[in-house]
Amino acid sequence: MQRFLFLVLAALTALPCHAQDLPAELAPVHLADLTSQQGETLPSFLLRVGGALHGYTRETGFEACGAIGEQDGIYSVRLFSDRVPHGCVVRTSTLAQGFAFTGETIHSHPHAKVLTMTTRAHAWSQFYRDGHAGAPTLRNDGATGFSKADRANGDGWLVAGGQLLHLVNGKTERHGSVSTH
């Protein structure tokens, strides 16, 4: 349930009324725009993207995420964080100019097995109605892999435990350690 909102909210963020209703104190932070090199495969590119996700999540304890875009064989990801440990809203409408959404996303999970809910995390949960607004802590079932909610949301990419993982048809494919420099 922790990641219930991850992909469900991706569709909602495309609605103008939803973006206008977001309280200023819950505004996401833009982390980076990353683009692949000509001829670089998606997994190779995402290993580099994964390094940025891993570093941010390790330093802050927050999830981060992005929609994967493609244009003429070049990939792009614009990374955001909602600055909470238990979710990240994918903003498919904020791809770099000229890039089309591939239908896949990438996100990171914190390493801690128990996530402490901050004031911001409580407000985020209340706004998105994920059922965790009153919880002091949450069990992180995705510290080293896809959570149950991730699996329910379908295929996508994840950085957990320093590894790049890809969920395809319910099965996890491992793509190796992410670059940390």
Image: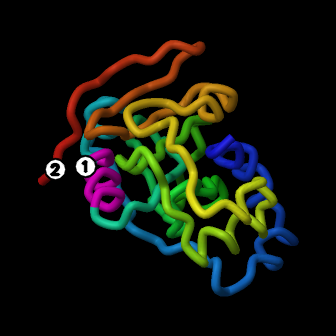
Of the pair 14 and 158, the residue shown nearer to us: 158
Q: Which residues are magenta?
A: 49-58
Number of callouts: 2
- Whichever of labels 1 and 2 marks the residue nearer the N terminus, that label is 1
Which residue in the protein does label 2 denote? Answer: 180
Query: Which numbered dot is residue 51?
Result: 1
Q: Secondary structure at mark 1?
A: helix
Q: Amino acid at mark 1?
A: Gly
Residue occupying image coordinates x 69% and y 40%: 1
- Eyeballing the image, is 84 above or below 2? below
In the rendered structure, are the residues bearing label 1 and label 2 in contact, judged by CB atoms less than 8 Å apart? yes
153 on left or right of 146: right
Residue 101 on the magenta span = no
- At horizontal 56% and vertical 36% (from top left) the residue drawn is 104
Q: Is residue 90 above or below residue 172?
A: below
**Tag 2 secondary structure:** loop
* Whole-percent x, y for residue 96 in the image: 50, 60
Q: How is the image coloured?
A: rainbow
At label 2, the amino acid type is Thr
